[in-house]
Image (spheres, helix red, strand yellow):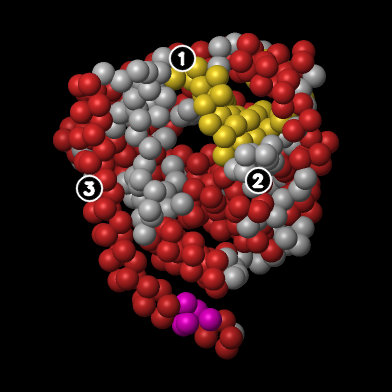
Amino acid sequence: MNRRLARAVVDCLRFDSSAAPALDRIARFGERDWKTSYRWLDDSGLVLYFLHRLTELQAENVLPACVRDRFKDNLEKNRLRVAEMAKEFGALTGGFEEAGVQYVAEKGFTLVPEYCSDAGLRLQLDLDFLVSRATVEQAQAVIRSIGYFQAEASGPPDRPWEIGFRAGQLRRPTGNEDYYRPPDQRSVELHFDLWESDREGVEEGSPEEVFGRSVSRSWNGIPYRALGDEDALIQKALHTFKDIKGCWCRPSLFLEIASFLRNRSVDDTFWARFRDRVGDRAMLADSVNFTFSMALNLLGGTVPAGGWTNQPPNPALSLWVQRYGSDWALADYPGSKLPLLLYPQFIQSRSLCRKALTTKLFPRRSPGLLAFTETPQPWSLGAARRRRWGILVGRANYHGVELLRLCWHYPRWRRALSRSEGAEATA
């Protein structure tokens, strides 16, 4: 991945400056630079947003012809993908209504238009719904009625956090998936809480309160129940925050948050309600302030007059955003482990923090590579074993390099943090 190219793409998408300087830089990159960056561009979720921005600026010619054609092909395929997913979204929401399921749609199509102006520009991989446990059987029956089967569940067997369903062609995942074409495998996830408070350490309200604040909306002629504006923004922030703690996050999530913040920048009534919703929950306020600061640092914008929360930004988190935020956000998948420097800020118990850091630094679980397969053939098993060993070697190299990187940055981070705390104490 060409890091200078990635930076120019993000700068072209910024909200607070002219795109002209970024376009001048983009025009200097050749075909080889773009091809070596395709994987990052796809993983980032920014390709179609970037193409749309160039179209708005009438500047598509800054791209080499083959790159421009590739991005336009991505857009055409993604629009077909979105159209197919929209049909299933309508079938599911209609089925839920008929069956009396208490639900709200999450993420995905519900982000249009405030987070994303056009669903065809967004990289969406599945459909997500929050459902009440009291009506989960009816919800499962609706999902199975349109061809899905239950594939997995996360959390305790007697009270899972979420249940995943799959449909379509069953095949082994590959390392070069085409994110944009209509999916062979379709996915639906049922969630039972807006956020897994016990697992993630960020307190949230009860599902009953969330359902009570839900609203009726319509997208593309499809009526559905959605989260209230404040709940939707909290969920978006926490979902992004979870990815940051996991050491990699799609930059497109920051773009979508920055877009919402820009759209609501002068809506004082909304921000008063939002601050009230966050309340005095310190960890939630830290998570929100940190995630929004990352979005503004990367893509520009302004903080509303009264702030995002009633709690001032955590100085350590603000320092991390200034020192590492932009470079970290542009990292190739599977990302950089620099967010581990912040774990002591989010995990108050030393023993739990040490356990979480050990798990992230020295993971024992290997990636699942053979999920959702048909009856394997002998030749395919051999290829799967070779691929498995290749991935394990690559992962070992990644964890080793990131451990060295963290060891290099840790003393520098501690010194910078001490200087910051000293300056704050004397101010």
- Is residue 342 visible in the rendered image? The answer is no
For marks 3 and 2, give the one nearer the viewer: 3
Q: Main secondary structure of the magenta part?
A: helix
Q: Is residue 90 within the magenta segment?
A: no
**As shown in the figure, which amino acid type bears the numbered disc 2?**
Trp
Indicate the position of residue 369 as horizontal and vertical percent values: 34, 34
Q: What residue does disc 3 label? A: 393
Residue 195's disc number: 2
Spatial CA distance of label 3 from label 1 is: 32 Å
Classify residue 132 by image quadrant: top right
**As shown in the figure, which amino acid type bears the numbered disc 3?**
Val
Indicate the position of residue 239 as horizontal and vertical percent values: 57, 45
Query: Which residue does the image show at 25% across and 30% down from the upper left?
Result: 384
Task: Give the magenta-colored segment's residue range.
Answer: 417-421
Q: What residue does disc 1 label? A: 168
**As shown in the figure, which amino acid type bears the numbered disc 1?**
Gly
- Comes first in the chain, label 3 or label 2: 2
